[in-house]
Image (spheres, rainbow, N blue to C red):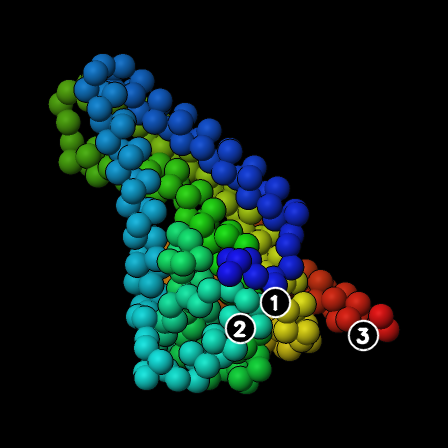
Amino acid sequence: MSARGRFVKDRGLNFRMGTALFLNGLIYVILILGIWYVLGRSPAGVVIALVISVGAFFFQWYFSDSIALRAMRARVVSEQEAPELHAIVDRLCQLADSPKPRVAYSNSPVPNAFATGRSPQRSVVCVTQGLLQTLEPKEVEVVLAHELSHVAHRDVTVMTIAGVSGVVAGLLVRMGFYTRYRGSSNNNSALVLLGLMAVGAIVYVLSFFLIRVLSRHRELAADRAAALLTGAPSTLASALTKLSGQMTTVPTQDLRAQGAANHLAFLPAVNGKSVKQLFSTHPSLEQRLEQLSKISTQLSRPQ
């Protein structure tokens, strides 16, 4: 069985994923070389740089799904616990001829869904209580088709790998701030910390924008794949409109609780006024609806 199944291919997405992997790999090498250089180009610096690079990649690769589930306050549920949800996923997997991922559920009032995992065989799709309360079953189905297409396209795997540079860079900056605030009488140590913070900050900014460029296109690709698989672009448009409107009523503290998983979610957990499009992980609602409208027109034309 093909992991991609019957989900439509997207050459633009494939190109961007390849470019993102290459550039993130390059950034990661620069980051590790920067750590080694700041630490004095010593044998100890080489060991530290290697431990950081290998450890961070291992942690991100094997625990990214657990981290995402924790960020969404979700847990994997069995067929006995969520029979209707599993039935929808089973039906979509049969339609798409793709492997079935684990199914998770979150009690969060934030109406959202996401998919993550290092491979199609180790993936998980999750929906929140808020989403199930907001959408009709057919709308839930097309949203899950969107999430399953992320798994089939393997862009969740790429996002997992691409996030390693940002994680390490962010840790360096936090470590520098923490150590600096504790104080140090050693001028050389202070310079080393400042150097690590500078390297971390530069790499974090580069990784931040690179991930967002990929994330926006992958959302459009998933919308398109889900609409064509289910033949229901208008239903997906309805779900997007409902969820976007509902997001404005969610308390700010609940939105913040899921902010760490925004790049994986069906919709960013923001109220629409608290984020600039330049920094958004998703294309605008208008862009997504416009694409779905075009697909609906195409599908309605006689073949």
**Mark 2: few/some/many CA within 10 Å (<14, 14-19, 20+):** few
Q: Is residue 13 above or below residue 180?
A: below
Check contact, mark 3 vs mark 2: CB within 8 A: no
Cα separation between marks 3 and 2: 24 Å
Q: Looking at the picture, how far across and down is residue 227, in whole percent?
A: 65, 69
- What secondary structure is marked by label 3? helix
Q: Looking at the picture, how far across and down is residue 133, in whole percent?
A: 46, 84
2 vs 1, front mark: 2
Identify residue type, mark 3. Answer: Ser
Q: Between residue 3 and residue 59, name the one nearer to us.
A: 3
Regarding residue 303, the answer to whether it shows in the image is: yes
The disc at residue 300 is: 3
Q: Looking at the picture, how far across and down is residue 214, in whole percent?
A: 55, 47
Q: Is residue 66 left or right of residue 224?
A: left
The disc at residue 245 is: none
**Mark 3: few/some/many CA within 10 Å (<14, 14-19, 20+):** few
At a point 51% along the width and 64% down the height, the residue shown is 98
Regarding residue 172, the answer to whether it shows in the image is: no
- What secondary structure is marked by label 2? helix
Can you identify the residue that label 1 sits on?
A: 226
Cα separation between marks 1 and 3: 16 Å
Q: Is residue 235 above or below residue 157?
A: below
Q: Between residue 54 and residue 240, name the one nearer to us.
A: 54
- What secondary structure is marked by label 1? helix
Q: Looking at the picture, how far across and down is residue 60, in whole percent?
A: 33, 46
Can you identify the residue that label 2 sits on?
A: 94
Identify residue type, mark 1. Answer: Ala
Mark 2 and mark 1 lie on one chain; the one further toward the N terminus is 2
